[in-house]
Image (cartoon, rainbow, N blue to C red):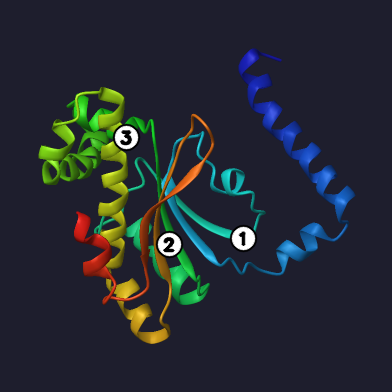
């Protein structure tokens, strides 16, 4: 067996070990999961392999519905995201939607430093627009790491605002007074999640919460 074959076989072996562990703890574990999902949370996060929603929140399968993309963006013409949002709001009836960014985000850093061609560069234009809106503040930060960190935070604010601006969220607020929309950021360096002061449940909340933008 080649090195590459061993690398992916490790995942299958890990799955078998995980299954046996779960069954050892609860013989009906998978039967329970198969009955359906009833998560209270939708997580919109970054695709970064170090930022796994269930791992960093200590939750179990079935508790968080997840959408991930490069730099945790909420783009109004992203049909994939909108489909996830609609399903989680209208079918799963989630109570909370969390936009979670992270420090050390490669997408944020690339948006400031590199220009290229293709889908990645088109995607990063969304972060460059966040930078443009906050250029005076961001460019006044001389320490490069702190500059990236601040832009990552501002990106969460902007994406949470984009989320609150969707018709899916607005109609759900009018219909059932939910979900709450939150903005968090995660530090890979110490494993800690931090709230950014965003917790919105109606259009009336939006001007106050996002005034800092």
Task: Give the structural element (helix, strand or loop) at label 2.
Answer: helix
Residue 5 falls in image quadrant:
top right
Q: Residues within 10 Å of mark 1 (few under 14, many from 20)?
A: some
What label sits on residue 149 in the rendered view?
Answer: 3
The residue under the point 66% across, 55% down is 61
The residues bearing labels 1 and 3 have C-alpha atoms spaced at a distance of 29 Å
Residue 66 against residue 165 in the figure, above or below: above
- Residue located beneath label 2 in the image: 84
The residue under the point 45% across, 76% down is 90
- Residue 18, given in percent of the width and then of the height, sits at 77, 41
The residues bearing labels 2 and 3 have C-alpha atoms spaced at a distance of 28 Å
Sequence-wise, the earlier of marks 1 and 3 is: 1
Q: Are marks 1 and 2 in contact (CB under 8 Å)?
A: no
What label sits on residue 55 in the rendered view?
Answer: none
Sequence-wise, the earlier of marks 2 and 3 is: 2
The residue under the point 17% across, 27% down is 115
Q: Is residue 135 left or right of residue 6?
A: left
Foreground residue among 125 and 141: 141
The residues bearing labels 1 and 2 have C-alpha atoms spaced at a distance of 15 Å
What label sits on residue 63 in the rendered view?
Answer: 1
Quadrant (top left, top right, bottom left, bottom right) of the C terminus: bottom left
């Amino acid at each position: 067996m080649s090195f590459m074959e061993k690398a992916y076989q490790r995942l299958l072996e890990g799955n078998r070990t995980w299954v046996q562990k779960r069954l050892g703890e609860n013989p009906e574990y998978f039967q329970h999961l198969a009955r359906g999902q009833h998560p209270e949370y939708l997580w919109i996060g970054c695709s970064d392999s170090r930022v796994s929603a269930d791992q960093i929140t200590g939750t179990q399968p079935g508790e968080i519905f997840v959408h991930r993309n490069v730099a945790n963006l909420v783009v109004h013409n992203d049909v994939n995201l909108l489909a996830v949002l609609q399903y989680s709001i209208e079918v799963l009836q989630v109570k909370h939607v969390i936009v979670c960014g992270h420090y050390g985000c490669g997408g944020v850093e690339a948006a400031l430093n590199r220009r290229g061609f293709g889908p990645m560069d088109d995607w990063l234009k969304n972060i460059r627009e966040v930078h443009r809106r906050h250029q005076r503040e961001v460019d006044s930060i001389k320490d490069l790491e702190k500059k990236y960190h601040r832009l990552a935070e501002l990106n969460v604010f902007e994406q949470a605002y984009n989320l609150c601006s969707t018709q899916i969220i607005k109609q759900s607020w009018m219909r059932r007074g939910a979900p709450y929309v939150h903005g968090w950021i995660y530090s890979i360096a110490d494993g800690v999640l931090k709230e950014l002061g965003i917790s919105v449940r109606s259009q009336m909340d939006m001007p106050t919460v996002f005034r800092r933008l």
